[in-house]
Image (cartoon, rainbow, N blue to C red):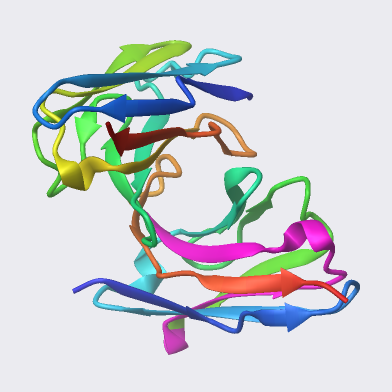
Amino acid sequence: EVQLVESGGGLVQPGGSLRLSCAASGFILRSYWMHWVRLTPGKGLVWVARITGDGTGTTYADSVKGRFTISRDNAKNTLYLQMNSLRAEDTAVYYCGRDQDGTGPTVDYWGQGTLVTVSS
Amino acid sequence: IVMTQSPPSLPVTPGEPASMSCRSSQSLLHSNGNNYLDWYLQKPGKSPQLLIYLGSNRASGVPDRFSGSGSGTDFTLKINRVEAEDVGVYYCMQGLQTPFTFGPGTKVDIK
């Protein structure tokens, strides 16, 4: 059974940093591109970042480019999102998702999400 | 690419059909013939789930009462007989070019 379990969310002050993790099981992680997507009350779902199966290719939303870094450790079956210079507008539930087949960003499995709150 | 959805809210009656629209600011039709448009449902308190990919392909395990249609810039998601479990927010998402973008959602609830 495919499972994705996020962790690492919490309360952080503006300007602070946080690293999210997504533990994958039930499939061979290195065979799949992966995504981070966030849900905010005001904007709904927003795509954040994508990474290729071997980790050599990354793409970001303009709103997080230069501040967030997506990475992966296939040996540990884990996806990461390093978030720096956090802003209030980064407050959201963050989901990791598996890309169905790499031909388009269709996410066929989602984690349960982890809440990030940026506030002083 | 900017995505819009209508209506923003859709009260439905169980057993009756329902339909919602998604429009993109640019054509999502690729030269390979695929429309890079997916539909997701986020039920209350749950993670999003994939319903339809590439405009009209039902995802594994999705009931056949859900269907997607359209091409280019105009897409439709139909539920031919709504069930109570179908409540939630329906999002369309374009996957033609980065940054990938979602529509604002259509919230479906029971009348």
Q: Nearer the viewer, residue A33 or A11?
A: A11
Residue occupying the point 45% across, 59% down: A33
Q: Residue at x 49, y 16 (%)?
A: B23
State the extent of the magenta-drawn residues as a range.
Answer: A75-99
Task: Based on the picture, tell me whether residue A61 belongs to the magenta stretch.
Answer: no
Q: Quadrant of the C terminus of chain B?
A: top left
Instruction: Where is residue B88? Give x, y as percent.
Output: 35, 44
Relative to B111, does residue B35 appear above or below in the rendering?
above
When asked about the image quadrant of residue A93, the answer is bottom right
Where is residue A69? Give x, y as percent.
71, 68
In the picture, measured across the screen, residue B13 lies left or right of residue A99, that is: left
Give the quarter of the image for residue A116. Answer: bottom right
> Residue A27 vs residue A106: left or right?
left
Q: Is residue B11 left or right of residue A104?
A: left
For the residue pair B91 and B97, the one nearer the viewer reads as B91
Give coordinates of residue B97: x percent, y percent: 58, 32
Q: Quadrant of residue A24?
A: bottom left
Side of B19 where A78 appears, left or right: right
Residue A88: x %, y % from top left: 82, 62
The quadrant the N terminus of chain B occupies is: top right
